[in-house]
Amino acid sequence: MDVQQQVLSLVDEVLGLRGAARSWGPQSPLLGAVPELDSMAVVTLITTLEERFGIRVADDEIDGSTFATVGALTEFVRTKLDA
């Protein structure tokens, strides 16, 4: 499974979307477009990404643009994996 599919699977799981997120693409909007993605869900999603991918995310590394689209979130995870 590629990184984007893994990220979508986690988004789907954390937000309880029952498979809906798995069909989204890189341009699919997240923050502001998915009602379930509130501030608490963002924190849970970051924690889950850290655990599943074995990455660490510092507070100053993320902002709203990180969660703007599926592609932005996937690219952030890829960058952390390559570090």
Image: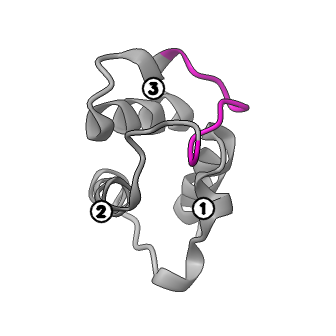
Label 1: state its secondary structure. helix
Mark seen at residue 82: 1
Quadrant position of the N terminus in the picture = top left
Query: Which range of residues does the magenta coloring cover?
Result: 23-32
Crowd band around label 3 with a 10 angstrom C-alpha radius: few (<14), some (14–19), many (20+): few
The residue identified by callout 3 is 1
Quadrant position of the C terminus in the picture = bottom right
Mark seen at residue 71: none
Label 3: state its secondary structure. loop
Q: How many marks on residues?
A: 3
The residue located at (47%, 82%) in the rendering is 59
The residue identified by callout 2 is 47
Residue 38 vertical placement versus 30 (above, below): below
Residue 2: give x, y in percent of width and height.
Answer: 52, 30
| Residue type, mark 1 in image | Asp
The residue located at (62%, 59%) in the rendering is 66
Q: How far separated are the C-alphas under marks 2 and 3?
A: 20 Å
Q: Nearer the viewer, mark 2 or mark 3?
A: 2
For this view, does 15 lie left or right of residue 62?
Answer: left
Q: Mark 1 or mark 3, which has the lower sequence index?
A: 3
For this view, does 49 lie left or right of residue 23?
Answer: left
What secondary structure do most residues of the magenta stretch adopt? loop
Q: How far separated are the C-alphas under marks 1 and 2?
A: 19 Å
Crowd band around label 1 with a 10 angstrom C-alpha radius: few (<14), some (14–19), many (20+): few
Residue 82: give x, y in percent of width and height.
Answer: 60, 62
